[in-house]
Image: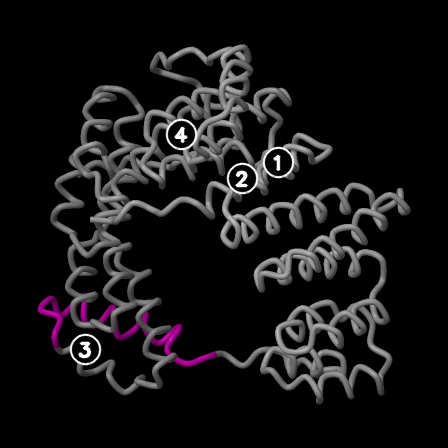
Amino acid sequence: MSNTSVKVLSPHSPAVPLRIVLVAILGAAAGVGWLAYLRSPHTITDRALLREAVAEWQRAGRPGGAIGGEIFKQQARQGYYDDAAWTGRLFDRPDGVRWSVVELARIRAENGDLSGARATIKRFAGSDLEAQIAEAVALVRVAKGDLEGALEIAGAGVDQEEIFLEYARHQLESGDFAAALETAARMRSPNQVFYELGDALAARSEQNRVRELASGIKDRKLAAEFKRLVRITLWPTIGCVIELTPCMIAADDAGRGRFAEANALIEQNKCKDMSYVAIKEYATDPAGAERLLRSRSTTEDLLFGLDQLAIEAAKKGNIAEAFRFLSDLERLKDGNARSSALADVRVTDAVQGIARYWTSRDGPKVVLKWVRSRPTSEQRTWALLAMAQALGRPRKAG
């Protein structure tokens, strides 16, 4: 059995040497051409919006951060595999391109396109990417409860320990503890399964099942090891006791929907930075939530609160109110240079949320006009992605 450890890299991991020749990154001119096409009259679809988001991202010079990867993943989830592959080739770093190859195969498997995922493994046979792709696809099969299929896909180039561990976790989540121990028996080092089984028994207050479960293990040496190691996590340890302040209790009350109690504590104790409470309260008392936010927030907390209330208003279908919160957020951004970087993030987040829920309510035509008028490329790109998410439907998993 191979001991090769396979790790899937993200687009932002440190660069690693390439052993295979990947397709050259396409030029920005292609993105500009797509943008011209997409701005001509045509039916607005999620695929077209995602392509426009890619073109916008290219036009901005393909900046780092999450947006390129998020567009790529949305294209793949929607089944636009050729588009996703094209986007993946645009990542600036070789390890980002490699990640996109592995991630595309993984998402194809999640979507039920197992033949497409297998074809990707075959296409990279003999390269150092083959094992990475095979492990990613195999772990998808494990999540779907197909251990033998996962092992067959993984083949000899993947360390099977991770496959067995993930399958045992799948069994623990479903409460099939005896089966998880059978899986553990197939591992070289099953200790992690024993620890996590102890956690699961403790969560269910079923610590008295250890003897019963151990009796089902045929290997008596392994059974003794299980009984020894499971006790490490079987009983919760007593940590330090944190004394809750009135303001912390108010936040907890809000999480439980007890807003009258939360507001009383906030008022009595003059609590600050209560945006969490205001956001929770907005669903039942919008006016009270806004009053709380504006009276009890520092600048940074107010930025976050206005961002979230804009999104919550859009989610409720109140686009006019969402715009009002966004306008206040933009004014706050312009008036506070010290928090401008954070404010930029909050404005972009609010624009993204409004674009998504407004598209769901009224369709894409009027929203797209607004999105294209936004002042920064980052806002336009994230909003186009949000519109595509609102229009798209994930592929049915197999």
Characterize the local packing of mark 3: few (<14), some (14-19) or many (20 or more) Cα atoms within 10 angstroms: some
Q: 304 or 118, which is in the foreground? A: 304
The span picked out in magenta is: 216-236
Q: Which residue is denoted by mark 4 in the rendering? A: 100
- Residue beneath label 2, please? 365
- Considering the numbered disc 2 on the image, is that residue within a helix, a strand or a loop? helix
Three-letter amino acid code at disc 4?
Ser
Give above or below for 277 relative to 112: below
| Vertical position of residue 228 compared to residue 335: above or below | below
Residue at image point 80% right, 47% down: 330
Secondary element at image label 3: helix
Point 76% across, 79% down: residue: 247
Marks 2 and 3: which is nearer the front? Answer: 2
Is disc 2 in contact with disc 1, using a CB cutoff of under 8 Å? yes
Q: Which residue is mark 3?
A: 213
Q: CA distance from mark 2 to mark 3?
A: 60 Å
Point out the tag, 3 or 1, that comes first from the N-terminus: 3
User: In this figure, which residue is indicated by the disc labeled 1?
Assistant: 369
Q: Nearer the viewer, mark 3 or mark 1?
A: 1
Q: Residue at x 25, y 73 (%)?
A: 175
**Amino acid type, label 2:** Lys
Whole-percent x and y of residue 305? Answer: 73, 61
Crowd around label 1: few <14 · some 14–19 · many ≥20 (10 Å)? few
Residue at 51%, 13% in the rendered image: 33
